[in-house]
Image (cartoon, rainbow, N blue to C red):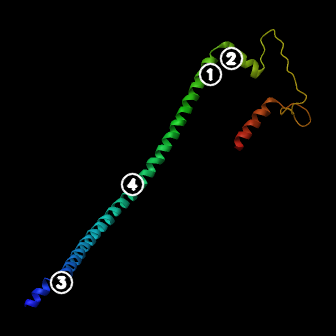
Amino acid sequence: MAGKDRDRFSTATRLRLLGEQTAARVYRSQNRRQDRRSRLTGRAAFLALVVCSLVVALAYPMRQYVSQRGEMAEQRERMAEAERQVERLRDEKARLRDDLYVQRLAREHLHYVLPGEVGFTMIDPEATEDPRREADGAERPWYSHVWEGVDSADQR
């Protein structure tokens, strides 16, 4: 036994025992880390599954939200344009209450003249052919223009 004790306390034996103990500690430490890693990997996988589920669950509502926001902006633009049109029409309505303005429009567009005035119509020789004239040069009656307008509107 004395040989065993001496062997037990020799430097080589101590170093060998110390190396084995250290190796065992490192092995246990690695096993613990691997256990933690596998637990973290499971947790990470579960977390990734939850995040993916949330993304899938929220994708359609988010798409709808963004699409509706675009539609709302478009409707606001249409509303603003309609308000501008209403304002223009109100201005025109106010102008039409003025007799001088109506008279000016009648002169410009309907070629009206006041009593005592002489109206002249200038014909431009370079202008295109008058649509009121037939192919043979005779002027068509006014009601043929009305029917032509009705027929063209009917074709649309």
**Kind of residue sitting beneath label 2:** Val
Residue at (33% x, 61% y) in the render? 50
Q: Are marks 1 and 3 in contact (CB under 8 Å)?
A: no
**Kind of residue sitting beneath label 3:** Thr
Indicate which disc residue 36 carries: none
Q: CA distance from mark 3 to mark 2?
A: 123 Å
Residue at (78% x, 31% y) in the render? 143
* On screen, residue 138 above or below 106: below
Q: Are marks 4 and 3 in contact (CB under 8 Å)?
A: no
The residue carrying mark 4 is 58
The quarter of the picture where residue 91 lies is top right
Q: Please state the horizontal and vertical placement of residue 134, each as a whole percent of the image.
A: 87, 35
Between residue 135 and residue 31, name the one nearer to us. Answer: 31
* On screen, residue 80 above or below 122: below
**Kind of residue sitting beneath label 1:** Glu
* On screen, residue 47 above or below 126: below
Considering only order in the chain, which callout, 3 or 1, is on the residue closer to the N terminus?
Answer: 3
The residue carrying mark 3 is 13
Q: CA distance from mark 2 to mark 1?
A: 11 Å
Q: Are marks 1 and 4 in contact (CB under 8 Å)?
A: no
